[in-house]
Image: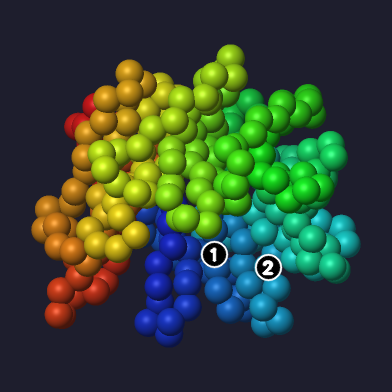
Amino acid sequence: SSGRIVGLAFHQDQTYGGFVRNTDGSIVWVNYPGALETDWLGFAAAGQIAGRYMDSAYLEHGFFGPVSGPYTRFDVAGANQTSPVGSNSAGQIIGYWMDSANVLHGFLRNADGSIVTLAVPGSKTTDPEDINTSGQVAGVYTDQSNALHGFIRSAAGAYTTYSFPAGKTNASVSINDAGEVAGYYYGSDYVFTGFVRDTNGTITTFTIGPATRTSVAQINQGGSVVGGYGGTRGLRRGYLRRPDGTTVSLEYPGANTITSTTTPSAINQSGVIIGYYQINTTNNTVVHGFILTGVQ
């Protein structure tokens, strides 16, 4: 909500590193000391970030701390690797961890350093994907028959589950502070369908135009959703979906060729959208970031 941005960039040595872009346009690199790569980043408690990094053995660990460091590493006890994927302003961090058999489990790290394992009752795997300000966690899980479902975990630890259509094997979800969930799902046909689940449990599905792939990146406090759409190949554009279901197509100027992309990745409470774009020409295949304002 402050207007700062966290993200990833590709270094000249062909490795990924994190960055924070301040509201004045200045950029601070974030690289965990000695890491092969610094991956996901998110804002946590006031003045802090959370992230994950890869060590020399190609295993992932979590970390948090001030933007410029020093950083504190953390791992789930008994984990083969620990991979944070989300955080909130209360300093809570969620993610997944792999055991010695490479089975996927979820975790929640509280601001006091305590770590709670997340597992939907009766699940085979549990994969948290987002956490809101009050501590509600949204994610996906598979049951013992490998069927895919979604879940919401309350701050008190109670689980609410819902199902995706039969045959859907992949999904991604986001949750806002009101408890609304937005996401998308797909199966072996790679047809992506977006959806919004309101706080009463009603699910509304949507696709953008004739596109075979409608993905969802994030839902903000007001219920506006951003994501991308397009075919399995060719030009891909972004979109803003308003709470009333109407949509606006988003295309970075010049990113309008068959090999170009405009991909929104987040929208904050004020409706500011961030993302990345690529204009594929003979001499330009670089991915750039963008900030978009004034689209409501």
Report the Cα–Cα distance between label 1 and label 2: 9 Å
Residue 127, placed above or below residue 79: above
* Towards the viewer: 145 or 243: 145
Near-viewer residue (228 or 7): 228
Work out which residue is located at the far left of the displayed protein and give it: 254
Q: Which mark is residue 159?
A: none
User: Residue at horizontal 14%, vertical 80%?
Assistant: 282
Query: Which residue bears the numbered disc 1?
Result: 39
How many numbered marks have been drawn onto this rendered protein structure? Answer: 2
Residue visible at 26% across and 55% down in the picture: 236
* Image marks 1 and 2: residues in contact by CB distance under 8 Å: yes
Residue count near mark 2 (Cα–Cα under 10 Å), binned few <14, some 14–19, many ≥20? many
Residue 121 is situated, as x and y percent measured from the top left of the image, at: 84, 37
Residue 80 appears left or right of 193: right
Near-viewer residue (68 or 295): 295
Q: Which residue is mark 2?
A: 60
Q: Three-letter amino acid code at disc 2?
A: Glu
Mark 1 and mark 2 lie on one chain; the one further toward the N terminus is 1
Residue at 71% of width from left, 81% of height from top? 57
Q: Quadrant of the N terminus?
A: top left
| Residue 203 visible within the image | yes
Image location (x, y in percent) of residue 48:
57, 47
- Residue for point 22% across, 58% down: 235
- Examine the rendering and report whether any part of residue 47 can be seen: no
Instruction: Give the vertical position of 294 relative to 253 (above or below).
Output: above
Give the x, y percent position of residue 285: 24, 74
For residue 280, which quarter of the picture? Answer: bottom left
Q: Is residue 276 left or right of residue 166?
A: left
Q: Quadrant of the C terminus?
A: top left
